[in-house]
């Protein structure tokens, strides 16, 4: 029996950036450990650190029942990300939003990162997703935000068996006593898209990754599949020219990721 899918749209609560809005530049800093501060860039998210953070019912899977059930139960949060978490505009805003939770956190993001590849231009601990998760686990992290899958879907050309195996590897590395909030991948690249878009990352590959995450959700009580692919609308300038990365959508993404943490199971 699978936990119910709660379709939510966080955009109603987000401030949509307008053209010309300045984006924060990445700092290239080393591993970030924050204990919360008053310099948050956004407001309206005080519920994330309170007893009303939302109860995650979890799936009825065979593993993960010893994991934290809400953000309030987390000892330390670890974000393991790829380019959407590494770029200017989203990186610093994600960090600022995480500070509003009042939870200490570790942050590692790299362009091109996957479960098996380290990527480049790393902020924080260097390595592929498995290396980073194992390092974070040794640092006391028991709640993970996993923004990984776009590069895996592209590298495997949407091969379901390979993607399922990679998800299993991540969940094994995390362990059954830690919670995972896995952000689903999405692009707007279709076979009919203009040639200037990056056709190595069609959304049909991303859809297979999303399907495999949904299937894994049944097996793991400590996995929450966070459907970013369902939670936003399009407007001019939201996406970068390549159809894979975000432009004005970067701040929307950064706000959504933290505000939607561990709410009512799979979104």
Image (cartoon, grey):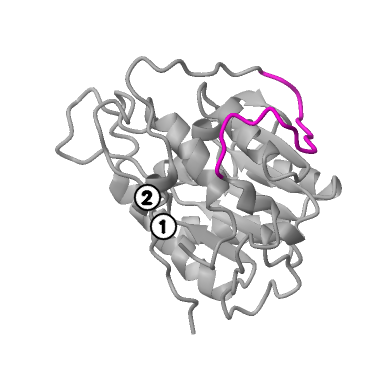
Horizontal side of residue 161 vs 190, given as left or right: right
N-term-proximal mark, 2 vs 1:
1
Residue displayed at 14% across by 38% down: 192
Residue 89 x %, y %: 50, 24
Horizontal side of residue 74 vs 83, given as left or right: right
Residue 61 x %, y %: 59, 78
Q: Report the residue marked by disc 1.
A: 210
Label 2 and label 1: CA atoms lie apart by: 9 Å
Residue 195, compared with residue 172, is above or below; it is above
Residue at disc 1, secondary structure? helix
Residue 94 x %, y %: 59, 34
Q: Is 37 a magenta residue?
A: yes
Residue 32, compared with residue 12, is above or below; it is above
The answer to whether the residues at label 2 and label 1 have Cβ atoms under 8 Å apart is yes
Between 254 and 229, the residue placed more toward the observer is 254
Residue at disc 2, secondary structure? helix
**Which quadrant would the C terminus be assigned to in this image?**
bottom left
Residue 227, compared with residue 131, is above or below; it is below
């Amino acid at each position: 029996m699978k936990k119910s899918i709660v379709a939510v749209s966080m955009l109603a609560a987000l401030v949509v950036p307008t053209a010309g809005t300045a984006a924060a530049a990445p700092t290239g800093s080393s591993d970030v450990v924050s204990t919360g501060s008053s310099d948050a860039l956004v407001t309206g998210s005080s519920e994330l650190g309170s007893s009303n953070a939302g109860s995650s019912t979890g799936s009825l899977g065979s593993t993960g029942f010893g994991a934290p059930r809400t953000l309030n139960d987390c000892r330390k949060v670890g974000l393991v990300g790829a380019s959407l978490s590494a770029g200017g505009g989203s990186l610093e805003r994600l960090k600022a939003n995480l500070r509003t939770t009042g939870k200490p956190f570790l942050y590692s993001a790299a362009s091109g990162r996957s479960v098996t590849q380290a990527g480049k231009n790393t902020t924080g601990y260097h390595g592929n997703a498995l290396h980073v998760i194992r390092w974070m686990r040794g640092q006391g992290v028991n709640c993970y935000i996993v923004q990984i899958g776009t590069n895996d879907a592209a590298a495997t050309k949407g091969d379901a068996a390979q993607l399922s195996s990679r998800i299993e590897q991540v969940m094994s590395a995390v362990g059954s006593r830690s919670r995972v909030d896995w952000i689903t991948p999405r692009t707007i690249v279709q076979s009919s898209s203009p040639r200037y878009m990056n056709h190595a990352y069609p959304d049909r590959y991303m859809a297979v990754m999303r399907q495999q995450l949904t299937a894994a959700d049944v097996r793991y009580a400590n996995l929450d599949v966070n459907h970013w692919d369902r939670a936003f609308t399009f407007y001019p300038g939201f996406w970068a020219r390549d159809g894979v990365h975000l432009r004005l959508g970067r701040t929307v993404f950064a706000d959504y990721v933290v505000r939607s943490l561990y709410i009512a199971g799979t979104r």
